[in-house]
């Protein structure tokens, strides 16, 4: 699989759909998602976007936990992130959570590249299922980009 990335276009509406439940099942449910997200965040710490994230070990662990919960729920597993989102739709909540960071397209590409690396470690999952999960990430991540090379800032809405 080639883990294709298409460029973000400032102001353009981003259409996306949540990952199919098939991905959740194929990786082995909550444990599988946890494994993927922990591997991803370990790689983040070796990446060019490491500086965005807390350096304190306990805070870093908390981010891994939160991230795992979000992905469990967005992939159709139990609603373990529900309380965090305080009644706001999950994707909406997640876009706004990123507003406090200055995220460039370059940061998004690094984030996606790191995730692709973690996804390549998953064995025996149908390519179409991986493709569907990637499609969500590739599109949704456009909404987290809020800072542009000309210095302008634009907060995307769903
Ligand atoms: C598909 C795209 C993305 C998804 C689904 C996603 C999801 C998440 C989740 C679930 C969390 C933890 C939320 C919590 O604390 O409850 C988080 C935190 C964070 N994400 Fe993302 N993210 C995405 C893209 C990005 C990108 C492109 C960046 C670029 C740097 C980024 C930077 C961060 C940072 C800095 C934090 C918070 C760390 C902290 O709390 O100190 N994310 N993200």
Image (spheres, helix red, strand yellow):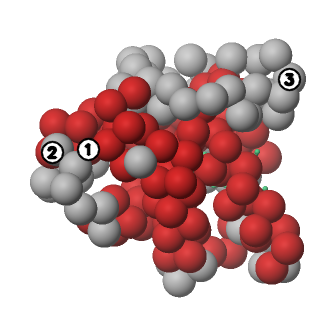
**Distance of label 2 from label 3 (alpha carbons):** 35 Å
Per the image, the residue denoted by label 2 is 127
Please rate how many residues cluster around mark 2, counting C-alpha atoms within 10 Å: few if below 14, some from 14 to 19, many from 20. few
Q: What numbered label is drawn on residue 86?
A: 3
Figure quadrant of residue 59: bottom right
State which quarter of the image contains the N terminus.
bottom left
The reply to whether dot 2 and dot 3 touch (C-beta < 8 Å) is no
Per the image, the residue denoted by label 1 is 130
Left or right for 94, reference 127: right
Ligand 1 neighbours mark 1 (CB distance < 8 Å): no
Please rate how many residues cluster around mark 1, counting C-alpha atoms within 10 Å: few if below 14, some from 14 to 19, many from 20. many
**Residue 130, how many percent across, how many down?**
26, 44
Left or right for 60, reference 128: right
Dot 1: element: helix
Dot 3: element: loop
Q: Residue at horizontal 80%, vertical 61%?
A: 62
């Amino acid at each position: 699989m080639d883990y294709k990335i298409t460029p973000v276009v400032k102001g353009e509406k981003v259409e996306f759909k949540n990952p199919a439940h098939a991905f959740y099942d194929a990786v082995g449910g909550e444990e599988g998602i946890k494994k993927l997200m922990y591997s991803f965040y370990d790689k983040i710490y070796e990446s060019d976007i490491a500086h965005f994230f807390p350096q304190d070990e306990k805070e870093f662990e908390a981010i891994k936990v939160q991230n795992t919960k979000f992905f469990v729920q967005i992939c159709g597993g139990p609603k373990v992130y529900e309380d965090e989102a305080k009644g706001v739709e999950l994707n909406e909540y997640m876009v706004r959570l990123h507003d406090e960071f200055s995220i460039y397209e370059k940061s998004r590409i690094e984030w996606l590249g790191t995730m692709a690396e973690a996804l390549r470690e998953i064995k025996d999952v149908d390519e179409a299922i991986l493709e569907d999960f990637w499609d969500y990430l590739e599109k949704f991540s456009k909404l987290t980009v809020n800072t542009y090379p000309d210095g302008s800032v634009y907060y995307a809405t769903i």
